[in-house]
């Protein structure tokens, strides 16, 4: 059963090996981390880009790209947090304004984290108008 993420601090960062890491701090001070490799992140982004009109589900992505659901979840959560992906019901859609260059925006976010650039310095707000 999934646990709600309320009252938790969630931080995304890059690892020395070039993976995306989601660090979760629980209210009691305990921490855990999940990772997503660059290969899986790129595959998730490509799948979303190819299916942006019909929306996507985490399990469908994981099955289609043959990747662990935890890694897909980390990628989806980053894309949602950064405003590139919106959730309506159980489906994820590319956020308005990012459709023409979704892949580029998503990879910019990933690469900025790997390089250690803070999110406020990444120019994701330069979406199409």
Image (tube, helix red, strand yellow):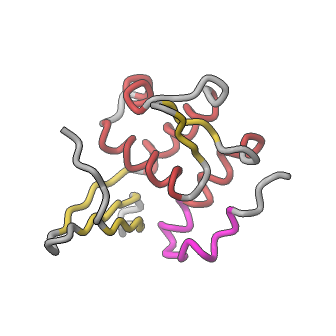
Query: Does residue 88 sit above or below 75 in this rendering?
Result: above
The image quarter in which residue 72 lies: top left
Whether the magenta-drawn stretch holds residue 50 is answered as: no
**Residue drawn where x is 73% and y is 40% of the image:** 99
**Residue drawn where x is 32% and y is 69% of the image:** 9
Does residue 13 appear left or right of residue 82 in this picture? Answer: left
**Residue drawn where x is 32% and y is 54% of the image:** 35
Does residue 96 appear left or right of residue 1 in this picture? Answer: right
Whether the magenta-drawn stretch holds residue 113 is answered as: yes
Does residue 119 appear left or right of residue 60 in this picture? Answer: right
Magenta region, main secondary structure: helix
Magenta stretch? 110-124
Q: Nearer the viewer, residue 25 or 122?
A: 25
Residue 95 lies, in percent from the top left, at 66, 44
Where is the N terminus found, in terms of image quarters?
A: top left
Residue 91 lies, in percent from the top left, at 50, 31
Q: Nearer the viewer, residue 4 or 74?
A: 4
The image quarter in which residue 12 lies: bottom left
Query: Does residue 115 sit above or below 40 in this rendering?
Result: below
Residue 82 lies, in percent from the top left, at 56, 58
Q: Nearer the viewer, residue 16 or 107?
A: 107
**Residue drawn where x is 30% and y is 55% of the image:** 5
């Amino acid at each position: 059963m999934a646990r709600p993420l309320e009252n938790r601090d969630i931080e995304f960062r890059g690892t020395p090996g070039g993976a995306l890491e989601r660090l979760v701090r629980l209210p009691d001070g305990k921490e855990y981390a999940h990772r997503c490799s660059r290969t899986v992140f790129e595959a998730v982004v490509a799948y979303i880009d190819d299916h942006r009109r019909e929306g996507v589900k985490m399990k469908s992505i994981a099955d289609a790209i043959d990747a662990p659901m935890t890694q897909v979840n980390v990628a989806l959560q980053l894309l949602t947090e950064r405003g590139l992906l919106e959730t309506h019901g159980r489906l994820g859609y590319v956020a308005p304004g990012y459709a023409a260059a979704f892949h580029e925006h998503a990879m910019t976010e990933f690469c900025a984290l790997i390089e250690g650039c803070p999110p406020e310095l990444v120019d994701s707000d330069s979406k199409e108008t």
